[in-house]
Image (cartoon, rainbow, N blue to C red):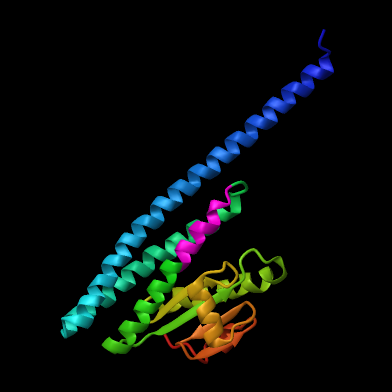
Amino acid sequence: MVSVFTKAFLLSVVIFSAGIAVGIWLDNSRVEDFRNTISKEEINFNDARLQNLYYQTISNSSEFCDAAAKANVDFSYRIFEEGKEIDRFETVNRFAPQILDQKKRYTLLQLQFWMNSVYLKEKCGKNYTTLLYFYSNNNESVSNDQNVQSHIILDFINRCGPEKFLSAPVPINLDIGMVNLLKEKYGITSAPAILINEKTLLEGLQSKDELEKYIEC
C-alpha cells in the first residue's frame, strides 16, 4: 500500500514536471513569435536597402534621397520597439537558448540600419549623429555601468529624435563576424564603448555631459 508521504512526493514531482513543461512551451512560443517578428523586419529593411541600391546605381534625384532617408527613419522606430521586446523576452526567458540566435539576427539588422544611415549621411548630405553602443551580453561585472549608459543614450534618442540622432546597440561577445571586424578596426577591447560618427571611440561609462560634446540635436 502506498503511503501518504509517497503519494505526496509523486504528486509534487508531477506538478513540478508539469510546471517545467509549461515553462518550456511558453519560452519556445515566445521565441517563435520573436523569430516571426524579426523575419518581417528583415523583409522591410531589405526593401529599404534595395531603394538605396537603386539610388546608387540609377537615380541622382534629391527627391529619392529624401524618400530613402524617411524609409530609414521609419525603420528606426520599428527596430527600437523590437529592441524593447528583446529586453522583455530576456527578462522572463529561462529555458530557450534560441534567444541568442535571434539576438544575433537582431544585431545584424541593427548594423544594416547603421550602415544605411552612414551611407545616406555621406551621399545625401544628411545632418545627424550616428552612434554605435558596444555592450557585453549577460556580463554581470559591467551590468550596472551598461544600464546607466543605456539610459543616457535613451535620453538622447528621446530628446533628439531619429532625424538628428541614430543609434544602434551592438553586443561584443556573441561572436558575430561583422562585430569582430568593427572591434578590430576601432580597437575595441571592453564594454561599454561608444563609437560616434565612425570616428570618435569612447570606452567606459560616459556621462551625459561628456556625450554632449560630440552629439548635436
The quarter of the image holding the N terminus is: top right
Instruction: Give the percent coordinates (x, y) of residue 92.
Output: 59, 49
The image shows residue 156, relative to residue 94, as above or below, that is: below
Location of residue 157 (image quadrant): bottom left
Instruction: Give the percent coordinates (x, y) of residue 205.
Output: 64, 81
Instruction: Give the percent coordinates (x, y) of residue 59.
Output: 16, 82
**Residue that appears at 37% across and 66% down:** 77
Does the magenta-highlighted stretch encompass residue 163?
Answer: no
**In screen coordinates, is 13 left or right of 138?**
right
The part of the chain drawn in magenta is 96-107
Please state which of residues 174 and 134 is positioned toward the viewer in this rendering. 174
Please state which of residues 193 and 70 is positioned toward the viewer in this rendering. 193
The image shows residue 181, relative to residue 82, as above or below, that is: below
Please state which of residues 89 and 60 is positioned toward the viewer in this rendering. 60
Whether residue 163 is visible to the viewer of this picture, yes or no, is: no
Location of residue 180 (image quadrant): bottom right
Instruction: Give the percent coordinates (x, y) of residue 136.
Output: 62, 70
